[in-house]
Amino acid sequence: VAFVLAGCVATEDGGEDGQRAPLPPPGKGAGLRAAGLRVDVESSRADVWKVPRQWEDKDAAAGWLAKAVARGDTIALTNLGQSYIPSVFVAEDDGKAFALLSRAAAAGQAPAELSLGYLYFTGRGVAPDLYQGMVWTVKAGEQGLPAALFNISHGYFKGEALTQDNDKAAYYMFAAMERSTPVQKGRFAAEINNVSRALSAQDLSRAAVKARRWSPGPGSLSDVLDDANQARARAAKN
């Protein structure tokens, strides 16, 4: 299991994939929700996509997102940027993904922050930089995104971008699970099983209790940034 991008579709309420409000009726001014995304459109007709990534009109999807981006819609900016990574309805282009997601992340869109961290972790569209990847992941995590907390857990468990620490891996994994949908919990299952095997039942119970007391907010993951800084300094010496 590696750093994940899954489950980070932006929605109008700032949520993630699997945490969507009901679809509004299509029509002028009503908006368009595509895979959990609300995009205001100028047309009086709109096709509503019912299943994530199963787009009924890919050209129209790209066009509507582009119009929304031009009007300053940072949710659309996030989703358009993400669409270039797995090639949802546009040709895969890591450079465009990085440029768009950088703008959306700078505007505070948590799913964009998570996705930008993923690009830094994997070196897609930008030179690999584990520290910057963790910086943006922490920003998303402080907004409560489970996938961001999962990536922090992964960093501690594998010693990637952070110093290896099974106790902290378990803590952030439980923090992620506390905020996850059933679908997301399924995505994290393999990693939680690996972490569980590395710790005693007592240690796991302690981490779970502690994780339930954690709450998102600015500065809530400052200790992770401190650890990332220390890991970067050690790597620079080697």
Image (cartoon, rainbow, N blue to C red):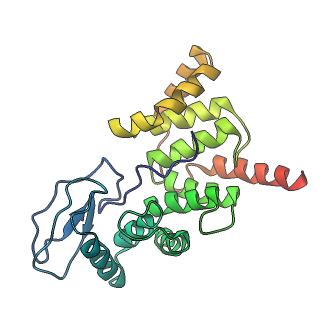
- Name which quarter of the figure residue 187 lies in: top left
At horizontal 50% and vertical 59% (from top left) the residue drawn is 115
In the image, residue 208 sits, relative to residue 4, either above or below, namely: above
Q: Observer-nearest residue: 136 or 142? A: 136
Looking at the image, which residue sits at the far top? 201
Residue 113 rendering spot, x and y as whole percentages: 51, 61
Vertical order, 172 against 49 (above or below) = above
Q: Residue visible at 71% across and 47% down?
A: 227
Q: What residue is shown at x 60% (from left), y 63% (from top)?
A: 124
The quadrant of the picture occupied by the N terminus is top right
Residue 172 figure quarter: top right
Q: Is residue 179 left or right of residue 203?
A: left
Count of numbered badges drawn on the protein: 0
In-image side of 11 versus 135 (left or right) = left
* Residue 181 visible in this rendered orientation of the protein: no
Q: Residue lying furthest front in this view? A: 91
x, y percentage for residue 66?
Answer: 34, 79
Q: Position of residue 205 (x, y in %)?
A: 53, 20
43 or 152, nearer to the observer: 43
Residue 71 % position (x, y): 32, 84
Nearer the observer, 204 or 5: 5
Residue at x 51%, y 30% (from the top left corner): 190
- Residue 153 lies, with reference to residue 38, above or below; the image says above
Tell me if residue 191 can be seen.
yes
